[in-house]
Amino acid sequence: MIQANISSTKAHLSQYLERVKAGQTILIVDRSHPVAILAPCRAAEGTGTWMARTAELTARGQLKPPSGPASLPVPPAIKKTHGAGVVAALLEERREGR
């Protein structure tokens, strides 16, 4: 494992990333104290996509899907007043209580 201090990491990040891409692991130290590890990302065991990896982890019980609504509520569309500027449209929305 390669060791690099923070200033060296900042100065030569692209070189360190090339080494990580080649399979090496780099220990980042601050005054000889380990603070982080730069390591290659493993492929999701052949799944390839984020959605497939999420499904795989959920099936294994390692990831719990959200229990709330699937998406946030969508606010109503801004009513466009013909020829009005943005400020006028915002003032109109404020008067309507939206």
Image: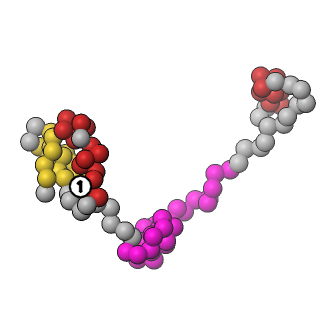
Q: Secondary structure at mark 1?
A: helix
In this rendering, is residue 85 above or below 36? above
Is residue 37 positioned above or below 5 on the image?
A: below
Left or right? Give the position of 78 relative to 55.
right
Label 1, residues with CA under 10 Å away: few <14, some 14-19, many ≥20: some
Q: Is residue 59 magenta?
A: yes
Report whether 74 appears left or right of 78. Answer: left
Q: Nearer the viewer, residue 3 or 68?
A: 3
The structure residue drawn at horizontal position 62% and vertical position 59%, both measured from the top left corner, is: 69
Whether residue 13 is situated above or below residue 19 in the rendered picture? above
Quick check: is 79 in the magenta stretch?
Answer: no
Give the mark count.
Answer: 1
- Position in image of residue 42 (x %, y %): 33, 66
Quadrant (top left, top right, bottom left, bottom right) of the N terminus: bottom left
Question: Considering only vertical position in the picture, is 2 above or below 32?
Answer: below
- The location of residue 72, given as percent across then percent down, is 64, 51
Give the residue at mark 1.
19
Q: Residue at x 61, y 60 (%)?
A: 70
**Which residue corresponds to the image point at 91% horizontal and 30% vertical from the top-left?**
82
Would residue 58 be visible to someone looking at this image? no
Mark 1: which amino acid?
A: Arg
Q: Is residue 50 left or right of residue 75?
A: left
Q: Which residues are magenta?
A: 45-73
The color scheme shown is: secondary structure
Q: Is residue 87 visible?
A: yes
Point 32% across, 61% down: residue: 41
